[in-house]
Amino acid sequence: MSTGTDSVAFLLVAPSATEKLIDAFLDDTFAGVHSLAAFDYLVLIPYFLMLAVLSFYGCHRFVTIWHYYKGLKNMPKEPPARFAALPGGMPKVTIQLPLFNERFVVERLLESAVKVRYPEGLLQIQILDDSTDDTAAFTEELCASYVERGYNVEYRHRKNREGYKAGALQCGLPTATGELIAIFDADFVIPEDFLENTVDYFTEAQVGVVQTRWSYLNRHFNLLTEVQTMLLDGHFILEHGARAGTGLFFNFNGTAGIMRKSMIEDAGGWQHDTLTEDSDLSYRAQLKGWRFVYLPHVHCPSELPVETYSFQVQQSRWAKGLTQCAIKLLRKILDADLPLRMKMEAICHLTPNLSYPLMILVSLLMLPVMIVRFYMGPLEMLLFDFPLIIANFVSLTAFYLIAQRELDPKGWKRTIWFMPALMAAGVALTISNTRAVIEALMGVKTSFARTAKYNLSDNKKIKVDQTEYRRKSGWLPFMEIGMGTAFAAMVYYCVESLNFLSIPFLMIFVSGYYWAGFSTLWQEYQGLLQFKAATRAALEAAPQQPNR
């Protein structure tokens, strides 16, 4: 009887061996005969242990769906009271707008900020600008024009980026006149009625945060933005809805929300030892007893990344930041006097990105596991695989489709066609997010990597002069193409061994890695062409110097 190691070599070097094994498999020769060797256990045990951990997070999606429906009745529709009817009247509000090299969206952002309806004299707008390009001069001039027209706009420009966004927000607090602090990133458009829909929830003294839902200006721009919309809707509809509706901790998302200034100070202020300062402050505040309110019926339009690498940079920053928060806060959460269900939800919330390194390891083991399990027969494979498929793929599909149905009961079915792309997009994040998680676990500090914003809508194309905002991907797309090719080889092996049931799942990995790698290289190539065209046009437009 061959060992697992022998069988790997046998299949790789003997062209006719595969046919013989297939015939033996079809004749059920190996059923009940093959006994696993030591190598087989070394492969199978870690493989199934890692799949079990991944399945744990998959099962958590089912729990989240259950919590969502359970908590629907608790979601607020109206504030408990109105400030206008209380002694003292409306509170002062400061809208903070942190910027870093946002030349193409700052005008849109500031224009929406000054249109926000609120009683005269009670609203302050702070521009917290860390820009190192021409954004600073342009924004300062823009703010001055609004000041001349009577708007209460304060422009603050830092010469350094200490603490990045968290540092800028903390730096603005001493001169913020508002009791409440609304925060918006540069890629958002602030609704005129935003404060009218949110401020009155602070009539309850223990409310520290009111978070609203994100919507998207460029949802239909390309396939990537369609998929991102589904991913974020899953977070804002089901995850936030489930946690807020059942009294669990949930996080302020760093934008499109409003916070009580005294809560920020009580929780220790903005700290920049993680890349997700919003989640960090959220947990510190809730551990202090502050209550958060989520309003899914209030939405704020934003712009999604339209380029693959920009999407990966954003997601890896979130993955690293949440992992850093887990390292920083989980011990405090577990030691706190909280119900077990709140502690378990916090673990699930702060650690899901650990699944990305596990997916890489599972990928590396997949081919030897397929070969070893070839001997086990279809019954044993179905016995082990079916529960894992339910826990992972079925939960993923149900999670995002239910979110779309809740958001759009009439038009949600069109999103079914995007589910394969959504799964492929998850695969496209594995390498970049794995690196981010490992850096967090090893304590590697990195800068806050901004996500390029281009002032786009569904029908608007990226302008030539905006290509300077693209980040360079380096080695990442080539590794992704290599991983895609490795999975393509596994597909070939499945065809050879007549294991057709595995092919659809493997093709998700092939398409995900190829999509990430080739689209990034193509977008960077297009950017290079645009840069050359812009340079050529500038040279042609420049005045000619006389020959001497």
Image: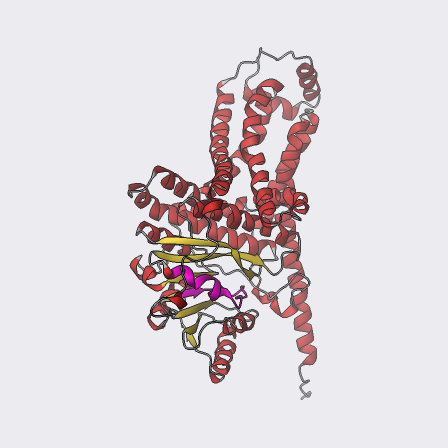
Residue ID at (68%, 84%): 544
> Taking the image as drawn, is residue 162 in sight?
no
Q: Magenta segment, which residues?
A: 181-202
Name the residue furthest front. Answer: 85
- Camera-nearest residue between 503 and 374: 503
Residue 329 on image: x %, y %: 34, 47
Q: Is residue 486 magenta?
A: no
> Taking the image as drawn, is residue 483 in sight?
yes
Q: Is residue 60 left or right of residue 540?
A: left
Residue ID at (48%, 82%): 144
**Corner quadrant of residue 368:** top right
Residue 143 on image: x %, y %: 48, 78
Residue 421 on image: x %, y %: 64, 45
Q: Quadrant of the C terminus?
A: bottom right
Residue 423 on image: x %, y %: 60, 42
Quick check: 326 above or below 30?
below
Quick check: 285 above or below 162?
above
